[in-house]
Image: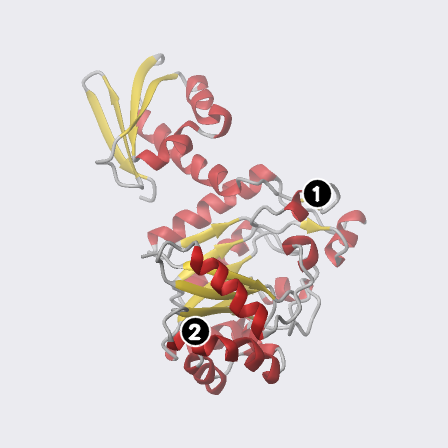
Amino acid sequence: MRPTTVPFFISHQGCPHQCVFCNQVRIAGTVGGIPDGEALRAKVGAYRETSGGNPVEVAFFGGSFTAIPSDDQERLLGPLQPLRERGEVSRIRISTRPDAIDSEHLAWLRGMGVATVEIGIQSMDDAVLDRSGRGHTAAQVVTACRLVKEAGMTLGAQLMPGLPGDTPALSMASLHEVLSLYPDFLRIYPTLVIAETRLAELYRTGEYVPLSLAGAVTLCKTLLRAALVAGVPVIRIGLQPTAELDCDGSVLAGPYHPAFRQLVEGELCLDLCRKLTTGLPRGTGVTIFCAPPRVSDVAGQRRHNLEALRRDGVHVTSIIADPECSHHELRVEAGSVSRRGNLFT
């Protein structure tokens, strides 16, 4: 049963460096102070009322949890302990940086109910990390991931393709290095130029050129395919749209799109459709079968994929939602021809 997540944003709390890309107020719409026990309990209670009986998970996002003062960590986790004992909170998730993790601290966190640790890795290239103001090295990432796994905790990894000095080849290399550390899930956030950041200054002076939307979709499609082939789920691609991000002047440049993941998955579907229709006579009418949730991905946003296939000489007569298709499977039929394929092979 999928848990209901109760999010708390502690933006910038515990962060010893100002990364060139980061402005959590613009991204999350909050200054991210430390909520008191009453606020913690009230929000959990409100979420439980609408959880439909699903387990409730508390998640602290936006800051470096293990780098904030220990008293503040206690103030955040302490009020949740009676809720855990009563079964009102099933588990706790935190986000942090790789140079703020040690085995003793992880043991304490686990005793306080923290089951998942997400690490902001961003890149495994030391030059990219340095130019981005991260203040840690790739070697520290390796150590941190090992410690989390040894502690028996769920490991999440966050990557940011398109940082200063990054290239598609370096992003792919970073992904493969991270996959070798056995994360349980990934988040992929293509770099955006957010207002009031050092990256915004570099962009204005021409020292930084962001990924285009098309370039980011192509890159993230490759990253997603590689991660899923390795059996590691990618739980988010692209920043969550917020009212703050959607305000004029928040995102100055870069591949921001409110449905970025759908663009990526749509490109994967288009690639497979092209593969499955290769060699068919131009103008051939085809029917595409897919899992019901995949219908819009197969069509593409604003029917982009259908138009691209039409230009290729393939006429898609219909897309049929077929419950017998797996989520990653498509089937194409054209007359007596029937072809089946998987998005990630």
Q: Say which residue appears at 34% left-offset and 51% top-offset.
A: 229
Q: Mark 1 sits on what residue?
A: 247
Q: Position of residue 175 (x, y in %)?
A: 47, 58
Q: Quadrant of residue 232?
A: bottom left
Residue 139 is at least partly visible in this image? yes
Q: Amino acid at mark 2?
A: Leu
The crowd level at tag 1 (other Cα within 10 Å; few <14, some 14-19, many 20+) is: few
- Circle 1 SS class: loop
- Does label 1 or label 2 sit earlier along the sequence? 2
Q: Quadrant of residue 19?
A: bottom right
Taking the image as shown, residue 336 lies to the left or right of residue 3, namely left
Q: CA distance from mark 1 to mark 2?
A: 37 Å
Q: Nearer the viewer, residue 20 or 38?
A: 38
Give the number of marks: 2
Q: Residue furthest left?
A: 336
Residue 270 is at least partly visible in this image? no
Q: Quadrant of residue 9?
A: bottom right
Q: Is residue 252 above or below residue 125?
A: above
Q: Mark 2 sits on what residue?
A: 83
Q: Say which residue appears at 57% left-offset and 56% top-offset.
A: 160
Q: Position of residue 293 (x, y in %)?
A: 35, 37
User: Which quadrant: the N terminus?
Assistant: bottom left
The crowd level at tag 2 (other Cα within 10 Å; few <14, some 14-19, many 20+) is: some
Q: Position of residue 87 (x, y in %)?
A: 36, 71
Q: Amino acid at mark 1?
A: Cys
Q: Is residue 290 above or below residue 111?
A: above
Q: Say which residue appears at 38% left-offset and 77% top-offset.
A: 85
Q: Position of residue 106 (x, y in %)?
A: 46, 81
Please tell me whether mark 1 or mark 2 is closer to you in this view: 2
Q: Say which residue appears at 70% left-offset and 51% top-offset.
A: 194
- Circle 2 SS class: helix
